[in-house]
Amino acid sequence: MKIYTKTGDEGETGLFGGPRVRKDAARIEAIGVVDELSAVLGVARASGLPRDIATIIFRVQNQLFDLGAELATPVAKASGPQNITERQIEWLERTIDQHEAALPPLKEFILPGGTVAASHLQLARSICRRAERRVVTLSAEAAIGLEIIIYLNRLSDLLFVLARHVNQTSGEADVVWEKDI
């Protein structure tokens, strides 16, 4: 089977069980940013994350694939797949709480930096925030499960905490913001 189908050559793509839509549609933009987020998480995993953090990121990548599939199915939440539920959100919250408990409390704003792996996680966090914004935009025109928005919001928090955790376990201090005077 060839990787190219030529069906998107005119700027459209197909949705699961639905119509063809323009590649710049809000739904496709949201799916694309979720895909970009997963890709940068793959880079983070390849950059030398500790095994326990890499395992978390691998699970998140699988959840993001499920989330993308839900976004790619243009049916109302009640009749369509609901891949992202309270269960995934609760797992994110437990994972945040577990890793945040081992960190010193934040007293200042911090900047992305430190180790390469932590920096990749911070990049992923910023892409996650963009994915969240794109899904919110999509939700103004289509039925999107609120769980997806909540999931992305919690995921960005998790990525922030994991970046700090990676720096701490590597002996790197948080990079503190200094006001430019």
Image (tube, rainbow, N blue to C red):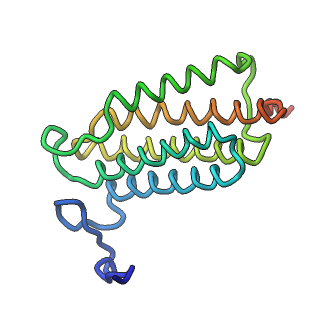
Quadrant in the rendering for residue 56: top right
Quarter holding the N terminus is bottom left
- Outermost residue toward the left? 79
**Could you tell whether 148 is left or right of 112 in the image?**
left
- Given residues 108 and 145, the one toward you in this image is 145
The answer to whether 162 is drawn above or below residue 21 in the figure is above
Quarter holding the C terminus is top right
Q: Which residue is drawn at 36% across and 40% down?
A: 136
- Given residues 132 and 77, the one toward you in this image is 77
The answer to whether 56 is drawn above or below residue 72 in the figure is above
**Could you tell whether 83 is left or right of 58 in the image?**
left
**Could you tell whether 73 is left or right of 88 in the image?**
left
**Could you tell whether 142 is left or right of 132 in the image?**
left
Across and down, in percent, residue 161 comes to 63, 29
Q: Residue at x 46, y 54 (%)?
A: 33
Q: Residue at x 74, y 18 (%)?
A: 104
- Given residues 142 and 156, the one toward you in this image is 156
Across and down, in percent, residue 87 comes to 35, 28
Quadrant in the rendering for residue 162: top right
- Outermost residue toward the front? 51
Q: How many labels sit on residues?
A: 0
Across and down, in percent, residue 75 comes to 17, 49
The answer to whether 165 is drawn above or below residue 3 in the figure is above
Q: Which residue is drawn at 48% across and 24% down?
A: 93
Across and down, in percent, residue 96 comes to 55, 25
